[in-house]
Amino acid sequence: SRWGLPVDAFHRYVGPEATFEVRLASLLGVVDARGPEMNRSETVTLFNDMCLLAPSTLLDPRIRWQELDPHTVRARFENAGNEVGAVLGFDDSGALSSFVSEDRSQTSDGRTYRRHPWSTPIRGWRDFGGRRLPAQAEAAWRLPEGEFCVMAGELSTMDARTSDEI
């Protein structure tokens, strides 16, 4: 919410194009971001989601890997004409612990963009019904004035109940 009113934010990435729209009270358009900066930024989001939530998708010829040291790799990912990079860090057990990209832009109005490092530190993994998922993670911009966390979450349980039981 903002100013006591509900805010709806919607990211969409279809084919080579991405949009980010924000509406205040579902009526007033506050942000309508689109174009090359958004396309590249959402390609970073897609690649990040692949790394955190669907690692089997990383066996893809559109990803080029470069080992930097035993705990760090640099990756370049191309999707629909948009190419982005990230540095991925791994802990001693081999689990992903960080994702940092210089290719994601920040916008508050959809017209002006500022490119800052964007990171998703992972603070532990857990097994949920045979699937290993991040137990705690954040999404943050590394701004000149300091880190700006836009999301922090914890996945503590997977509810096996059906929607009828909830």
Image (cartoon, grey):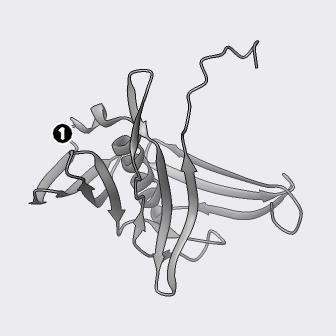
Instruction: Report if residue 82 is visible in the image.
Output: no
Q: Residue at x 46, y 43 (%)?
A: 135
Amino acid tagged 1: Pro
- Tell me the quadrant of the picture where the C terminus can be found: top right
* Other-residue count near label 1 (Cα within 10 Å), few / some / many at <14 / 14–19 / ≥20: few
- Residue beneath the point at 46% across and 86% down: 144
Q: Describe residue 24's horizontal placement relative to residue 130 as left or right.
A: right
Residue 94 location in percent, x, y?
21, 45
* On-image quarter of the N terminus: bottom right
Q: Position of residue 128 (x, y in %)?
A: 45, 27
Is 154 drawn above or below residue 142 in the view shown?
Answer: above
Q: Residue at x 38, y 21 (%)?
A: 130
Residue drawn at (58%, 54%) of the image: 19
What percent of the width, then of the height, locates residue 51?
A: 34, 44
- Give the secondary structure at mark 1: loop
Q: Position of residue 163 (x, y in %)?
A: 72, 17
Vertical order, 124 against 150 (above or below): above
137 vs 111: above or below: above
Residue behind mark 1 = 61
Q: Is residue 60 left or right of residue 136?
A: left
Instruction: Write down the quadrant of residue 116 in the picture.
Output: bottom left
Looking at the picture, tell me which residue is in the foreground, 127 or 110: 127
Using the image, determine if residue 100 lies above or below residue 45: below
